Amino acid sequence: MSTAPAPGIAINLTGVILVMEGDEAAIYASNFDAGGSPGLPSGPFEPIKHRTLELGLRSFAQEQAKLSLGYVEQLYTFGDRGRHAGESAAEGEAMLNPHIVSIGYLALTRIAPGTAPRGHFHQLYGFFPWEDWRKGPPAIIARDILPRLALWASDHAAEAASADRRALSRAERVALLFGADGTPFDEEKVLERYELLYEAGLVEEALRDGRKAATFWPSLPKLGRMMQLDHRRILATALGRIRAKLKYRPVIFELMPPDFTLTDLQRKVEAISGHPLHKQNFRRLVETGGLVEATGGQTMTRGRPAALFRFRRDVLTERPAPGLRLGRSG
Amino acid sequence: MSTAPAPGIAINLTGVILVMEGDEAAIYASNFDAGGSPGLPSGPFEPIKHRTLELGLRSFAQEQAKLSLGYVEQLYTFGDRGRHAGESAAEGEAMLNPHIVSIGYLALTRIAPGTAPRGHFHQLYGFFPWEDWRKGPPAIIARDILPRLALWASDHAAEAASADRRALSRAERVALLFGADGTPFDEEKVLERYELLYEAGLVEEALRDGRKAATFWPSLPKLGRMMQLDHRRILATALGRIRAKLKYRPVIFELMPPDFTLTDLQRKVEAISGHPLHKQNFRRLVETGGLVEATGGQTMTRGRPAALFRFRRDVLTERPAPGLRLGRSG
DNA sequence: GTAATAGTGTCTTTCAGACAGTATGAC
DNA sequence: GTCATACTGTCTGAAAGACACTATTAC
């Protein structure tokens, strides 16, 4: 009930800074560790220096990424960092070190082309190749993921060990998350997919953290790029969150320049949501939905010139949940 | 970047335990403070005792509310607890005490009628009378809230002090959140409404925390029941979250008995979402949506007997986002 | 019979998803 | 003219939202 300071707790603030580089989503990461794995900007929350959690995160972003953040939103607080970050080798000793709780944040920032500190931005789908369905179902799912998950799901002994009768079976979870057996692929379940792969021992972090699940398969394909600590889990949380949020909040405009063409807007939405959109419906949606208005200007690229649009700020006060209800497919 | 333990941080876990008492939503609260304000079950996170954050919360719920929780979900982590919890009187001194970060949780629990520890459950809308639209627009909005917020919004001096040009004006926020000027009332924005009232100095917590905004109005009506610390803010977060989640996850069934009638289901959904639902559409929705199946049983109350239904667990594996798309009105 | 609650049939409007087409530039 | 990109008109089927109506019990 009360508030005696528990000994040895530290709070770590970690930020996913999402930007667009052309038509690809990218995140800031540097701080490479000994193994060459990139890490997100992060640091300890110090109440003396940081008036709020979010201001703490902003200052780390400023120091480490040299970026001044616009839109920032809290994602989730992870307390079982040990499980995902290598403490497991010495459970007992870990007690002596401060227990670390990480609070993840998502930031959306527009970088003017060329301005970005080079070499520190990494394409998003390098970490989650199974999440990019813009060119159809990713080959990595059918070739590398599903066969191994099928094996993992057929381990009935492990299954039975779980006492929770209400829980879904392994096979059900695989079908639900990776869209086997005709189940539709739900692009928002990014975190759930990553955690399933972790649990099955298929991502490198699982091996690093000392899980021994990787006994089914002698050769382990590389399933996306590893990150430090639990950073890839935080990144998965961020991607799932922004995919969901696109549909009911006009957050995409945080990543757009002031003026843009509708094709440009569509490409960037596709980059984040991970699937192709139906062009006519997309245009109808943003225009009749009052999300954008024509500036009167035009581009001149090759091909027919495109009309320029800007975000219609008034939509915020007109409709309760303005977003892109995202007409799928194309 | 790294993880030297920042001195003087404590993490507090606070749980909103939501139950149904008949057709009313209620929460567990006890721990009354000197002023008689109820507090939610909570306690300090101690990594030695609690393997994860969620397990810590569960143990506090067990100890304090004597309830074993089913569904639990993390809501948000509040770091600026000071602003909402009375530190402001002595900003300087606060530095000496441990800085407290609170992590809010939402738990949904079914209590068998009569089993509940009496006297510790409080009706939800006692804390947020402006959120209950089941019998039409609450009188408290037109009578007590809007006139005062109109005054508050007309304070252009305060307005101009805000440098953020992209921010909405006070008047716009009022219209957007409380549905003035024909703007629809968005029932999910519970937290935003509470924070607006706090900012305007209209809820008692604002006075308690030493904000001096209450200069416009000599007499202040009681706008819902006050809670300890920042607990009402956490409660507002919880209500907003579950209202949103009802629409895409079948969480309502965590609060239902195994067998129930459709009318019973509808009443409980209405109690949480806060507005009346259209009967025929609701029934069509849950039946054709595959959320429920008939058990074959019937109730015998006065009036025509009602068919009993149960939750159809298979819906979880059939559809990506099974929920109640909530046909409004009635 | 009345009161009370449970349940059904069908209409209209909106909108997601898709079709096939036309327009305007560079070369 | 061709190629490339931008843009439009319209159909269809599935739901959301609403209408009025019938059914089965207790008394």
Image (cartoon, coloured by chain):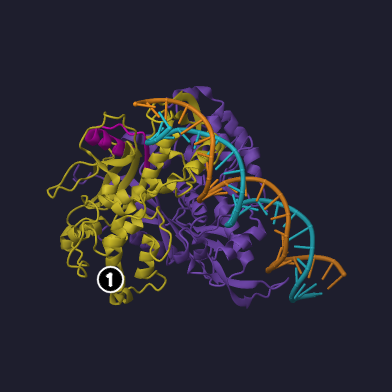
Chain colours: A yellow, B purple, C orange, D cyan
Picture quarter with the C terminus of chain B: bottom right
Can residue A49 be seen from the camera position used here? Answer: no
Q: Looking at the picture, does residue A114 appear above or below residue B314?
A: above
Q: Is residue B167 magenta?
A: no
Residue B212 in picture, x, y percent from top left: 48, 31
Residue B260 horizontal side relative to residue B165, left or right: right
Give the extent of the magenta segment. Answer: A55-73
**Chain under disc 1:** A
**D22 or B210, which is in the foreground?**
D22
Q: Residue at x 28, y 46 (%)?
A: B9
Q: How many marks?
A: 1
Residue B27 horizontal side relative to residue A57, left or right: right
Query: What residue would you read off at disc 1?
Result: A151
Residue B143 in picture, x, y percent from top left: 65, 38
User: What amino acid is labelled 1 in the image?
Assistant: Leu
Q: Which residue is drawn at 36% across and 63% down?
A: B59
